[in-house]
Each structure stands twice: as C-alpha cells, then as structure tokens.
Amino acid sequence: MKLTKFTHACVRLEKNRQVLVIDPGTFSETEDALNGAHAVLITHEHTDHFDVPAVAGALRDNTDLQVHAPASVASRLKEKAGDDDGRIHVVEPGSSFEAAGFAIRSFGGQHALIHPHIPLVANIGYLVDENVYHPGDSFVVPDGVSVRTLLVPIHAPWSKVGEVVDFVIGVRAPKAYPVHDALLNELGRGIVEGHLTRLGARYGTSYERLAPLESVEV
C-alpha cells in the first residue's frame, strides 16, 4: 500500500483505489488528506489529531465516507455533522473491523499521561492490514501481532526521548517512520532521530524520515 505522511500526526493510506486516512488534525493539511477518502480512523479527541469542522464537512460532502473513532469523538462528530446515516462508528479497544477494504485491529484505550492535573482521554491505536501501526498518543505495544511498519510519535508533551526509543525497541518493526513531530525544530529532530536510527538498528528496526506530503510503499 502507499503511505503518505502529512504534517504532524496524519497519514493517508491507499490500496486498490481505496483511501484510508488516520488522524486528520488541525496541524495537518486536512483538506488534501481527506480528498477522496473512503474511511477515516481517529485515535482521540485532541485537535492536533481531530479537526472537527474538516471531518464533519467531509462527511457532509462525501456520502460514502465512514468514520471510526472512540465514543467521545464519535459523539462530538455526530453533533457537528448532523445526520450521519450510520456512518460514524464507535471503536473499542481489542476490536477488529473493516474500513474501506482495509483490515483494522484496535489496541490500547487510554491517552498517555501529560500531567496529573490534565484529565486523561480515550485513545485507540490502529493496526492496518497487519502492517501499519498508528498508536495515536500512546506507547501501547500491540500484543499478539508482528508490526511491519511502525508510525512513531517522536515528540510530544507527554513523552521523553528514552520512552520513544523504548517504544521502537518494544515493537521491533522492520520499518519505522515519524509522526507527531510538528513541535520539533530541525536541531531537536536531529537529536531524536539520531537516537532512533542508532538504537533502533540494534533491534532490527530501520528508521527513516518522511517529510510532509512525502509517500512510500509499505
């Protein structure tokens, strides 16, 4: 399948003329990402992963579009989009379903802790076609599967570099690409990616940078 990275946390997957978009948020080029999409997966409710007006507008404009998300996201989206004709689906952890011809498995359930004074929200990680894993805002390692392509949140208010490295080591996917990187400048990115490249290789993971709107076959 073809994987296209957008700014920050959003990716677009294409296979057999079907398009699946994960986490079209306000930091990303949401209109481009959602153009012609058949299904959308949303990991959690934070705006850098979930652009409410953009996704609601896409639902209104594209009557074939299906959206899968945690209950809190689905509720907000139904309120904003109005009558969804049953096209907004609630996802629970540990479930399996099909979206636009892609086989999906869900993992996790909770956003990583930012601070004890900041409430936790639901977060779902998605494994697509037993290949691409997007963890959202968590370092949940999917159990019982072998991930082939890992999307790594390389920088976040809820993480540190050591945790990012341990996540890559824990999953041990052959390939890894960055997401959740909009808050890094080039100096900071170089430090994080240097560790991921060097230490990931020891455990069989080849880390590769993808720029916004760059694509790769996975």
Image (cartoon, grey):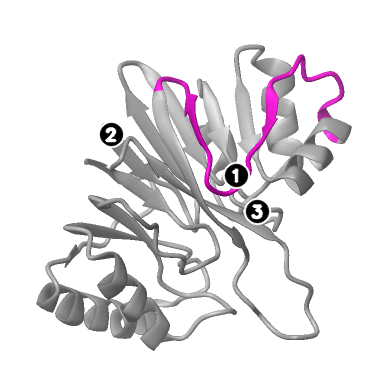
Q: Of circles 2 and 1, which is in front?
A: 1
Instruction: Residue type at mark 1: give it.
Output: Ile
Q: Is residue 196 above or below residue 75?
A: below
Query: Which circle's residue, 2 or 1, is located before the other in the chain?
Result: 2
Q: Position of residue 169 (x, y in %)?
A: 26, 74
From which residue to which does the magenta span run?
A: 80-101
Q: Which residue is mark 3?
A: 44
In terms of secondary structure, where does tag 3 sit? loop
Q: CA distance from mark 1 to mark 3?
A: 6 Å
Q: Which residue is mark 2?
A: 2
Q: Position of residue 83 (x, y in %)?
A: 84, 18
Q: CA distance from mark 2 to mark 3?
A: 24 Å
In the foreground, 216 or 138: 138
In terms of secondary structure, where does tag 1 sit? loop
Q: Which residue is mark 1?
A: 42
Q: CA distance from mark 2 to mark 1?
A: 19 Å
CB of mark 2 within 8 Å of CB of mark 1?
A: no
Q: Position of residue 66 (x, y in %)?
A: 61, 23
Q: Of circles 2 and 3, which is in front?
A: 3
CB of mark 1 within 8 Å of CB of mark 3?
A: yes
Q: Is residue 115 above or below residue 49?
A: below
Q: Quick check: is 155 in the magenta stretch? A: no
Instruction: Residue type at mark 2: give it.
Output: Lys
In the foreground, 183 or 163: 163
Q: Quadrant of the C terminus?
A: top left
Q: For the image shown, how many numbered marks are present on the structure?
A: 3
Instruction: Residue type at mark 3: give it.
Output: His
Q: Can residue 76 be spotted in the picture?
A: yes
